Image (cartoon, rainbow, N blue to C red):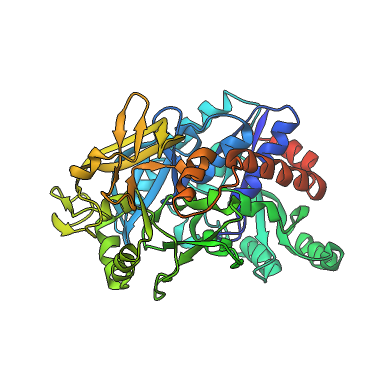
Amino acid sequence: MGALMLQGTGSDVGKSVLVAGLCRAFANRGLTVRPFKPQNMSNNAAVTSDGGEIGRAQALQAIACRVPPHTDMNPVLLKPQADRTSQLIVHGKVRGTLGSGNFRQARGSLIGEVLESYQRLRGQCDLVVVEGAGSPAEINLRAGDIANMGFARAANVPVVLVGDIDRGGVIAAIVGTRAVIEPEDAEMIRGFLINKFRGDPALFEDGYRAIEQRAGWRGFGVIPWLPATVRLPSEDAVILDRTASRGEGRKLVACPILPRIANFDDLDPLQLEPGVELVMIPPGTPIPGDAALVVLPGSKATVADLAFLRSQGWDVDILAHHRRGGAVLGLCGGYQMLGRTVADPLGIEGPSGEVAGLGLLDVETSLAPAKILRHASGTALGAPVTGYEMHMGETTGPDTARPFADLDGLGPEGAVSRDASVMGSYLHGLLATPEMRTALLARIGVAGAGRDYHADVDAALDEIAGELERHADVDALLQLAREAR
């Protein structure tokens, strides 16, 4: 039938959520839909049905379409490892590292593979909903672009521009985008959406018409602030807005925010627990002494993040927490940090060498170039568990004789300390399993609510789709999508 692309006036204007909402709205109308993002930059990733990895947002959008995630939905993924380097993932597999010096040339050479993925998706469905990255107004990045107008023009996909009114200046952001982009790029934009509106939309009627007049694009609607968004998997810094207010009798779960924190949506299911307060600890802030559980999250650069953790004094806080009898859970890179040493003999993350870990688990980790990507299920802490592995390296040592989990067809996984207060696992997504979450919380004296996280996400997607049907001209968007060749 066609395709439609949402681009934004900037980052974090809500493109990912709107694409997910439209995917669900179109699917609810009986259409077969696929999401697509040519290029993503994120350390939050998911394992796909074909054994690769894509950005977490595209995995969520696949759920919105009611289909399994596939590497074609996000053919190019950049995972930042340091300030000027990123791991390059193409069609779900590691292809090397990009630095600031070769970024533009390298990404521009990938347009052929991006279009191949897009065309395969087009052949599978009625409609492809495409998400841009950043903004087409970043004209300094236009040469070699494959994420926004470079893709839209190559694939001849009509574009709707999303503006975030909550941050202010939305009229200038949309009209200004028209002013700075190339005329040929402006022709690809067929209209705009106003997102994150609070209050009475009638108050913005004059502004809405001013945008239409000055930009020459029609409006497709004003989308209100969507409360259901907070129930979707976290992206980037959005998790900082999800810290609950402290309630009487709630047990504190603390997670330090590392510079290369990865897959921190692992913690989202804790938001379903009324007996838990999840607090993300920013740099410069000590880990609270009354925390019942400290979670060390995944990391794209274990060695560098371990050094940062020490620079913040968090190692002292965690060791003191452990001496007081507090529980500690390490996930993926966080699991590696809990051991005695982390070795990088081949310089996978940087200079080769070995560093001391926190020493809370009697294990050692050696990083290796091969990345393990797989879904897994089994039992953990005596409860059913499902999740996925996504890591580079192997962890061995005496504490692995007390595994955290026993995975079907894979055997023992992870480690537990002799006193059972410190746990480590490579399994992402384990807290989404209600029984597993309940078993873990029982160790800190919390009765789990047993709510189904996946069902809650699915219900949130339906709520968002319903809001889009009410506040956006979905019929006109569908008609626009039919114009894509």
Is 326 displayed left or right of 25 in the figure?
left
Task: Answer with the quarter of the image where residue 243 lies.
Answer: bottom right
Residue 286 lies, with reference to residue 117, above or below; the image says below
- Residue 241 visible, this orientation: yes
Q: Residue at x 52, y 42 (%)?
A: 432
Residue 252 lies, with reference to residue 65, above or below; the image says below
Q: Position of residue 331 (x, y in %)?
A: 36, 49
Q: Residue at x 63, y 44 (%)?
A: 19
The front one of 447 and 195 is 447
Q: Residue at x 70, y 56 (%)?
A: 227
Q: Position of residue 94 (x, y in %)?
A: 31, 40
Q: Position of residue 373 (x, y in %)?
A: 35, 35
Q: Residue at x 80, y 45 (%)?
A: 473
Residue 272 lies, with reference to residue 459, above or below; the image says below
Is 231 displayed left or right of 370 in the figure?
right
The C terminus: image quadrant: top right
Instruction: Check the image and name the residue furthest to the right.
Output: 202
The mark total stands at: 0
Is 24 displayed left or right of 357 in the figure?
right
Task: Answer with the quarter of the image where residue 299 lies.
Answer: bottom left
- Residue 153 visible, this orientation: no
The front one of 404 and 256 is 404
The N terminus: image quadrant: top right
Q: Position of residue 292 (x, y in %)?
A: 44, 61
The front one of 427 and 191 is 427
Instruction: Check the image and name the residue furthest to the bottom.
Output: 284
The front one of 323 and 101 is 323
